[in-house]
């Protein structure tokens, strides 16, 4: 399994190069998730010409916990993001592996950081941003995502 050292942190990643030249999409899972959430979406995007990089943030999936949120914040350095939450049918497929592979301290650290975070300056984002929400998602509602990204997708 591939790991990258990013600012001294070990980060698990899944890299799928495009079949032709195109943009690179960077996938970040939601709280309690893993890179696995995005696996069903990636083959079609690769076929459409996008390279896809999905990571497990520290303490989730296969990335070890790295003592706080600094490791998570420092991993994000690619301009095109796909962000998500945990309540989709795709996600339900991975619940068992997530429970077994998530670190409780990492979960609590990330939850606290979200609670304490200032409102992001979404208007300052200068690159196209695709927001994906699950139809049954109780965290990332489509109405809220409409205020953030350029394109919005509701997944059944």
Image (cartoon, rainbow, N blue to C red):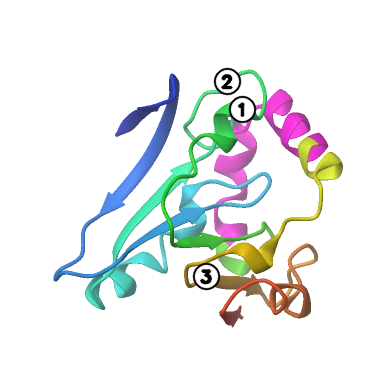
Q: Residue furthest right?
A: 115
Residue nearest the observer in this picture, 73 or 141: 73
Res 142 visible: yes
Q: Which mark is residue 70?
A: 1
Q: Which residue is mark 2?
A: 66
Residue at the image point whose x is 67% and y is 23% from the top:
68
Residue numbers of the magenta segment: 91-112
What x and y, as percent, mark residue 119? Answer: 80, 55
Q: Nearer the viewer, residue 123 or 22?
A: 123
Query: Residue at the spot x=80%, y=44% of the render?
Result: 117
The reply to whether callout 2 and callout 1 are in contact (CB within 8 Å) is yes
* Residue 20, quarter of the rendered image: bottom left
Provide the residue designation for mark 3: 129
Q: Upstream in the sequence, badge 2 or badge 3?
A: 2
Left or right of 144? Residue 66 is left
Judged from the image, the secondary structure of the residue bearing numbered disc 1 is helix
Is 44 placed left or right of 90 in the picture? left
Q: Tell me the CA gap for discs 2 and 3.
A: 28 Å
Is residue 143 part of the magenta span, yes or no? no
Q: Position of residue 11 (x, y in %)?
A: 43, 31
**What main secondary structure does the magenta stretch of the protein show?**
helix
Question: Element at badge 3?
Answer: loop
How many C-alpha atoms fall within 10 Å of the one at disc 3: few (<14), some, or many (≥20)?
A: some
Residue 103 counted in the magenta span:
yes
Left or right position of 81 against 146: left
The residue shown at (53%, 46%) is: 34
Is residue 1 in view from this perspective? no
């Amino acid at each position: 399994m591939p790991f990258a050292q990013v600012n001294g942190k070990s980060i698990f990643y899944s890299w799928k190069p495009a079949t032709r030249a195109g943009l690179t999409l960077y996938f970040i899972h939601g709280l309690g998730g893993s890179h696995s959430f995005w696996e069903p979406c990636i083959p079609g995007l690769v076929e459409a010409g996008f390279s896809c990089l999905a990571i497990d943030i520290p303490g989730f999936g296969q990335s070890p916990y790295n003592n706080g949120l600094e490791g998570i914040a420092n991993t994000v350095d690619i301009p095109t993001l796909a962000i998500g939450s945990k309540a989709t049918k795709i996600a339900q497929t991975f619940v068992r592996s997530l429970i077994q592979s998530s670190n409780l301290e990492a979960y609590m650290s990330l939850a606290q950081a979200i609670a304490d975070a200032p409102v992001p300056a979404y208007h300052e984002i200068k690159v196209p941003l695709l927001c994906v929400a699950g139809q049954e998602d109780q965290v990332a509602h489509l109405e809220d995502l409409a205020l953030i990204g350029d394109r919005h997708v509701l997944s059944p």
